[in-house]
Image (cartoon, helix red, strand yellow):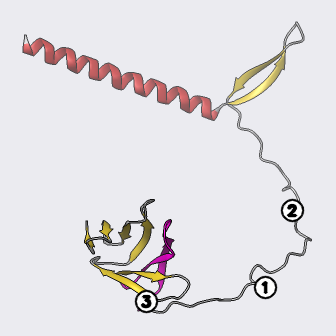
Amino acid sequence: MKLEKDRLIAKVDNLEMSYKQMIEEEHQTQADASVVPTKTKKDKLVFKMTNVPSPMPTKDRPNPNLNEAFEPSGAHMSCLKQFKGHLMGVTSLSYNPKKDILATGSDDTTWKLWSVPSGDLIMSGEGHLDWVGGVEFHPRGNLLATASGDGTVKIWDFVNACCA
């Protein structure tokens, strides 16, 4: 009984693989084919598939904004505060949704929390073995997720001041 069941399972698996291959081949032929409109006796437009690729356009469209003059993006802005504390480049930042706190991640393997707008360092975290490439607050603002080049994602709990 078990041997017959195993044979039937093998047959079903084989049929499923054959079916998947047929579907993939059908999709491939459809992707390779172009659609060409043709007219019939009743003056209805019918689309017919051919294996002829569509021609590439010979000219690029002109850029309508090529001759426009734009104001430089930073001309009307000025730096309000500069936060210094990381030993290497800052790779990511996130603003807390509930409080005026900014989180930064850095190539120096640390993350830091800053008070905004004063720029005071609130908390710093270590624990990753490689650069911190991403920081993001939980929507409630009580947790911070950090992603690192060491392949780990860590969740930091501010209430207990530890990795959750």
Q: Residue at x 78, y 84 (%)?
A: 76
Estimate the spatial distance between the alpha carbons at disc 3 and disc 1, rounded to whole Å. Answer: 28 Å
Q: Which residue is the site of mark 3?
A: 88
Does the magenta portion include 103?
yes
Q: Earlier in the sequence, mark 3 or mark 2?
A: 2
Does the magenta portion include 23?
no
Estimate the spatial distance between the alpha carbons at disc 1 and disc 2, rounded to whole Å. Answer: 25 Å
**Callout 3: SS:** loop
Inspect the image, locate mark 1, and give the three-letter code of the amino acid beneath it.
Ala
Span highlighted in magenta in the image: 86-108
Answer with left or right where residue 130 lies relative to residue 101.
left
Circle 1 crowding by C-alpha within 10 Å: few under 14, some 14–19, many from 20: few
Estimate the spatial distance between the alpha carbons at disc 3 and disc 2, rounded to whole Å. Answer: 40 Å
**Callout 1: SS:** loop
Camera-nearest label, 3 or 1: 1
Q: Earlier in the sequence, mark 3 or mark 1?
A: 1
Which labelled disc corresponds to residue 75? 1
Pick the residue in front: 154 or 140. Answer: 140
Circle 3 crowding by C-alpha within 10 Å: few under 14, some 14–19, many from 20: few
Q: Which residue is the site of mark 2?
A: 63
